[in-house]
Amino acid sequence: MLQPARDQSSNGATLLAVLPIHKRGTDPYLCGHLDIGVFYNALAFIFTLDKYFPTTKYKLRGLVVDSCSNNLRVDQDLYSLFSRGRLCNTEFSFDGEISNKTLAGVITSTSDHVMAANRVLAPLRVPIISNSATSTALSDKEKYPYFARTVPPDNFQMDVIARILKNKNWNSASVIYSSDTYGRTLFEYFLTRTSALQTCAGAQIAVPYPATLEQAKDAIRYIESDSKSKVIVLISTDPKIVLQAAKDLNVLDKYVWIGTDTWGASLEVVSGMEGDLLGSITVEPRSTPVEEFAKYVSELTFNERKGIPDDWFEEFYQMFHKCNIQSAKVNFPQYSACTGSETIADWARIDFQPYVLNTIAATYAYAKAIDVVSNGRCLSTASFEECFRVDDSWNELFSRILNVEWNIQNSLKLSRSFILKFNNDRFWDVGYNIKTLSTSTGYQDIGSLISDSFQFSSNYDNNKGNNWSPCRSTAVCDCLAPVVSAQTGNDTLRRVKASEPRNYLFYNIMNTTINNQFVPIYDLTYKWPIWAIAVAVPTCVGLFITFFLFLYLLIFYEIRGGTTILGFMTMLGILGIYAINFAFFLPAATDTCGARQFCMGVVYAIVFAALLVKAVDNWRFGENVDYFNQQQINEKYKGITGTGVLLLIALGIVCVQLIIPIQWLVHRPPSASLMTDATEIHDWMMCDPHDMYDKALVMSMIFVMFLVLLTAIFSAMAWDSDNNNYESRWILVSSVCTAGCFMVWMIVITNASPPYRDAAVALGNFFNATAILIFTIIRKVVIMLWPRSEEMEEEKPGSIIDERANDVYSTVYSNPGYDNDDAVFQPSSPRQSELDNGDVGF
């Protein structure tokens, strides 16, 4: 959506808004249905420029680009617009010039959109203002040096909720939070704020995002069994699924629910559950209806579209009026046909759209700063390009944005006081409204937090009756009482089990009262998990034995031909399986997470690539080789059975596996997140994304599982082959052991709670590596060192055993058909001399 050029000369300027006008479609790169709330924000952007900046020096106009809720579109469209002045994959002719010479800045919405825009614009020093990005990660001024927003970050609403609990003397509240970044971050802030206000977080549980109804029910069942409070704080990206689960379990009306801004005053979230949620409390950024904007939108008719693209307008028109335009690109056949004479008379549907006021404020701040700079340092320059050719102009523009001060109440004749002014943390602290769901009026205001001034209505009705208690009747749930684990006697210490640690270091937190002040006591439970110590010791033993055998065979094993090199390759893989365990003993971090993701599949691929080549080799030659036709076998397989060729085949198989973790690491660089309260006493880290990491680890092993299956099949087909002392049978046993270990640890890490996942992988690796070591390498060493029996000494003349009686290594493994220059022997008969020197490799 582009406003017409107000100046056809080269001194025009364009302010860009990148907004998710449409939701994501069935495919991430397709557009879904129109998001009416964001569509109103786009109109508010154009409305502000029309109302306040129609005659600026550089004739500022607005351009709205639809991201269709895909962050990749933000990157590519900004790059295209600032480099070539066009939109990617879009046939569109701009009215006037659009390029880095005329683009004056960018306004966008969600936190993900800001992060995507920052990747392109930060090096160019182009400021970014957001109307709705609330992520606390954006507060990092080093990563986002030219970013400001007209909403407070998420953590401020946790202060509101903590104050509500304190005001109502609800000394304990259970917490259900989503396991995404939004939920985890706010949960950590909530623990910090409640601790400061001497309020307790009781039972706590994370719900996956997105969650199924059954997963949400599991969270409710946990609260039902472990919570001693009848107040639940719901910090969820998708609160509706949790509320629905509570309703299905008939416990929704037992609790007073406190929701964050993802719930806010949305009737859609509570649809069908209003009666059970009466008295629930929600918080949302403070706002107010903008009557002038509502009037602006009400002027839209079928023939008066205010420059809105036809496909956007027709979709909005049908959704708003609930009618169908048959000629539109998107139809709504469930509605009757539109007459074209419909008008917008219901202002209430427009008045209180989310983030409209924030969008107006962001647009005004940006446009005002451009106007100030252009009439200040750029007074003598003719065009916008000349004005902003110097980098200092962009720095001054951002400084002017942060210094804008605007009395919105007077300018827009609002019913409440709003003054736009950015604070030192580069956001407009609009404050928060506190609402409750009422029987008659829907949501109504019961309090607010404005500039650290907290107000809460004394007329709040929780709709639970006068005798309702925030604690269950059979338990006490104040801060001095046990919340999770019971205490006895007069012990006033409170032991909190924050969420279970995944690995490494965990403390129990205890609070005691000294001089009426809460003092934390940190009870060290352990430094290393017991399982890590127990598994680390035998893992080190396995590493030592494998390394010793590797050196021993490398020095004393005289045969270097045939499949010997594959035996050494197998040992390197076993060493790798043992070694990768240490990445699971140590806490999750960037390096350990990267090691887990990259090495797990690779070390197993090294082992089974070698075993697969050996299994195929044994199967190919069969169990009963006619030695008198040996010359034909040699001619048939000559060139593909040399030591180097066998090694290259095995390495090629490993290279296939390498592709998988490399793609994973490129797509999602390794990182880890702190998964408990924001203190320094815990070290509970999980690899990101924590809700998908374990499943992704299993998926990265799919090719290895395929290798194990192929190895088992070929070794089973050669079960009766006596080649290499029935080597195929033991390769099959190793494959079966590996398949069993895989099944166990893969089931555990995708279903068990976090404390058991790393332990399962480490134990699986240890048992697996040990089994393969015993059934392949140690078995070969035992055969090699075993005293020769009298039967072997008395083999009939003319046999290969007889000819190699002095070569003990040839009795370990001997596949015929190889060129082996390292194992030359003198034949005893002319016929025997026609045979190849033979493979004698372990």
Image (cartoon, helix red, strand yellow):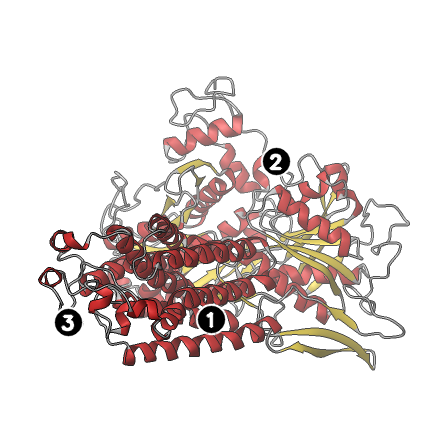
Local packing at callout 2 (Cα closer than 10 Å; few below 14, some 14-19, many 20+) is: few
Mark 1 or mark 3, which has the lower sequence index?
1
Residue 354 place in picture, x, y as percent = 56, 45
Name the residue at 58% across, 51% down.
208
Compute the Cα span from label 2 to label 1. 58 Å
Kind of residue indicated by mark 1: Ala
Kind of residue indicated by mark 3: Val
Compute the Cα span from label 1 to label 3. 46 Å
Given residues 636 and 378, the one toward you in this image is 636
**Which disc, if any, is residue 348?**
2
Which residue is label 1 attached to? 583
Q: Which circle, 3 or 2, is nearer the viewer?
A: 3
Is residue 247 shown above or below 153?
above
Mark 3: secondary structure: loop
Q: Residue furthest left?
A: 830
Is residue 745 shown above or below 25?
below
Q: Which circle, 1 or 3, is nearer the viewer?
A: 3
Local packing at callout 1 (Cα closer than 10 Å; few below 14, some 14-19, many 20+) is: many
Local packing at callout 3 (Cα closer than 10 Å; few below 14, some 14-19, many 20+) is: few
Mark 2 or mark 1, which has the lower sequence index?
2
Residue 86 place in picture, x, y as percent = 25, 46
Q: Can residue 403 be seen in this view?
A: no
Q: Is residue 772 visible?
A: yes
Which residue is label 3 attached to? 824
